[in-house]
Image (cartoon, rainbow, N blue to C red):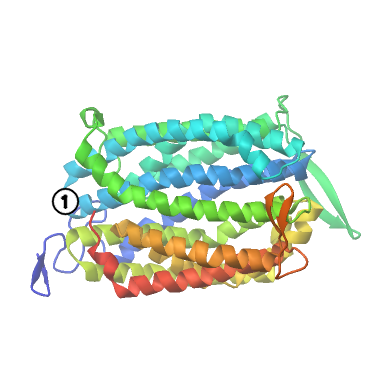
Amino acid sequence: METLAGRTVVGLTPDGTLRAGRLAGLSLRRAIWVLSWPILIESLLNSFVGLTDTVLAAALWNGDAATDAIGGASYIVWFIGLVIMSLGIGATALVSRSVGAGRLAVANAALAQTLMLAVVLGVAVGLLVAGLAGPVASLMKMPDDRATMFTHYLWIVSAGVPLTAILFAGIACARGAGDSVRPLYAMVAVNVVNILASWAFSGVDLARTRMVDGELVRQVFLNNPFGFDLGVKGIAIGTVLAHAVGASIIIMMAVRGTWGIRLVRHRLRPHWHTIRRLVRVGLPNLSETFGLWVGNFMIVIMVGWLGAEGMLGSHIVAIRIEAFSFLPGFAMGAAAATLAGQYLGAGSPAMARRAVLYCVLIASVVMGGMGLLLAMMPREITGLLTSQEVHLEHVPPLLIICGVVQIPFAIAIVTRSAMRGAGDVKMVMLLTWVTTYGVRLPLAYALSGVDLKLAENLVLENPFRAEPSLSWLWVAMCAELVVRGAVFGARFMWGGWTKARV
């Protein structure tokens, strides 16, 4: 047993390594590596699901309209993910603490209750999304053709939300147990099925666009041999089928005990003490992420108010590209969340802080380098994803803007994730709301130049800018990321997160 400051640390060996779980006996650096590289690849594969939908939509005959429709729907899909993630955060915190303390029976109970709640939550959210698809399209002021595709896409995706919930809630439990490799297998299968099924059902021909004599030339290199031609609906069907395969794999792993914790039938009965513990962490996280989603959905509405066609699609394409720059941050954040939880469960706040600092440093270096790449090659990178002229015009400036703030974004991502993994969710919620509503939205309104459309005949003109601008909207969002990195970094240094109760 290790003794720190006169206190016995039962969960650590004398050299500071964990005693229990799949990270037992690993040095800190080794544990970070073991956790982070599979999460990075898994996150990359998860992003490819949304990226595939966007790329296929852009390749349809009505590509600009389809991209706008799927771009708008992606924010609703993000809402689905945030609700599921709130349950996953509670699961990761409870499982990691239990494994760190060597209480595997409690971890097994948390796994079963998490998957049971995932199904219930998935059904409820799926029904909500299906019912609100039409009204949301109207709120976003979509033209009829885009609104129809938007609604059909969400109706199909909503049917698969329970499967999506099982997939990602199970992955959260596996990460809490210290196994980030095997969930990677499920995400590989998800991507293979999504790419093949979405391509087959959509009817899209695979093509590339090149600049020839100063003009964009589209060249088809693989004709779609299938006769479905379902367009956006086919893309949605592919996504649902992919998540069904992924959920099946996760259930199989959980039953076999692949992650060091096991799904046992008798633990699927409601266990109110475990449910309360999951809700105690998950509910504040749901409030936080819902507040964040509402703030960002208001940004999407502002994009719609810019008044020019193709702006929403350009906004989403830029976000899809930027996502690849902050995936290393999310990988390090997930590793930090697991390690913070396990070291705190083992009784060593000092090791928890050290683990998070290592993860912040790695994320900052990698994301800083990727931000430099975005700033130096924006047009070339954009051309890899879309051939639509409106995207090629508006996306590159956005990539330059976001490229310069990747380091403070990395600090925010990792420290925020670590505090969640430690159970400090109420403070995370407060800081997220303050930066979103106190900084992001006011800046976005002031710099974007959009007019507030409070009603059909009631418009408040923007007093700060005469001409609406998507680029200046992104300047506002990226400025908020700098503030976010500062406030979360300060909370981390303060150290109150190490005393959170799970």
Identity of the residue drawn at 76% across and 40% down = 143
Q: Can the viewer see residue 117?
A: yes
- Residue furthest to the top in view is 227
Amino acid type for the residue under numbered disc 1: Gly
Image quarter of the N terminus: bottom left
In the image, residue 297 sits, relative to residue 213, either above or below, namely: above
Identity of the residue drawn at 63% across and 52% down = 300
Query: Foreground: 221 or 128?
Result: 128
Please rate how many residues cluster around mark 1, counting C-alpha atoms within 10 Å: few if below 14, some from 14 to 19, many from 20. Answer: many
Horizontal and vertical percent for residue 501? 23, 57
Identity of the residue drawn at 74% across and 49% down = 457
In the image, residue 247 sits, relative to residue 334, either above or below, namely: above
Report helix, strand or loop for mark 1. Answer: loop
Q: Which residue is mark 1?
A: 102
In the image, residue 187 sits, relative to residue 487, either above or below, namely: above
Horizontal and vertical percent for residue 391? 75, 55
- Residue furthest to the right in view is 213
Query: Foreground: 443 or 264?
Result: 443
Q: Can the viewer see residue 205?
A: no
Horizontal and vertical percent for residue 146? 73, 39
Left or right: 354 in relation to 201: left
Left or right: 92 in relation to 386: left
Q: On the image, which quarter does residue 397 sit in? A: bottom right
